[in-house]
Amino acid sequence: MAIRKVDFFCGAFLSYLITNRVEPTLFEAGEKSKMLRFTIAQHDYKVFLKYSATPKESIKSKKENTKWDVIFTSKEMDLLKDYPEEGRKNVVVLVCTDPKMKNTSFVALDYNDAKACLGDDSINKQRRISISHIKNSPKISVYGTAISDKKAFQYDFNCDKYFGFIEKI
């Protein structure tokens, strides 16, 4: 029996949470995405998890840049419409890695920012969220089908800060 990539990446994220003493619950499993619930320090989270294992390397302003595009299917877009759950922090986690899965990072986005990047049906049938990281930068740029890279959201590259495992500076 072969393990699907999404199961591998979900397992990596579950391991990350368990290592930080969090007990997650997997409650929805799709072909290319997963949904989880967990609690950290009195904050209840609901996470929609996707991945990209095809980084694109480039040079931007004389610095090495890596970009991942995470494509969302029509079914996943439908799931996201009814996704938010009252009383929880609704989050989209993107697992960004390389084909050999040697360098893997978790990017946690607020649900509303992820939805803004994806846009609505008037934009395009194929939706994506793009993550751009300049080597050694503590920040990432997040944009997508409906948000240009010029208006990208800025997030800490370290997912530990998002979930409060280390203090935000």
Image (tube, grey):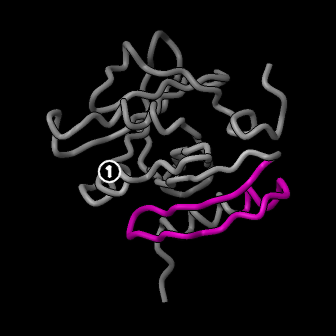
- Check residue 152 for magenta coloring: no
- Residue 162 against residue 134 in the figure, above or below: below
Residue pictured at 48% horizontal, 65% vertical = 6
Residue 169 in picture, x, y percent from top left: 80, 19
Q: Which residue is mark 1?
A: 72
> Left or right of 162: which side holds 52?
left
Residue pictured at 32% horizontal, 23% vertical = 147
Residue 5 in picture, x, y percent from top left: 48, 67
- Check residue 22 for magenta coloring: yes
The stretch in magenta equals 15-40
Which residue occupies the foreground of this view, 8 or 27?
Answer: 27
> Left or right of 55: which side holds 135?
right
The residue at the far front in this view is 86
Residue 31 visible in this rendered orientation of the protein = yes
The residue at the far top in this view is 61
Which residue occupies the foreground of this view, 98 or 46?
Answer: 46
Q: Amino acid at mark 1?
A: Phe
Q: Callout 1 environment at 10 Å: few (<14), some (14 to 19), or many (20+)?
A: some
Which residue occupies the foreground of this view, 134 or 16?
Answer: 16
Residue pictured at 38% horizontal, 51% vertical = 80
- Residue 14 against residue 149 in the figure, above or below: below
- Residue 132 against residue 70 in the figure, above or below: above
Q: Quadrant of residue 166?
A: top right
Say what secondary structure mark 1 lies in: strand
Residue 96 visible in this rendered orientation of the protein = no
- Residue 109 against residue 29 in the figure, above or below: above
> Left or right of 139: which side holds 98?
left
Residue 30 in picture, x, y percent from top left: 41, 69
Residue pictured at 68% horizontal, 39% vertical = 159
Q: Quadrant of residue 26?
A: bottom right
Q: Quadrant of residue 138?
A: top right
Which residue occupies the foreground of this view, 10 or 132?
Answer: 10
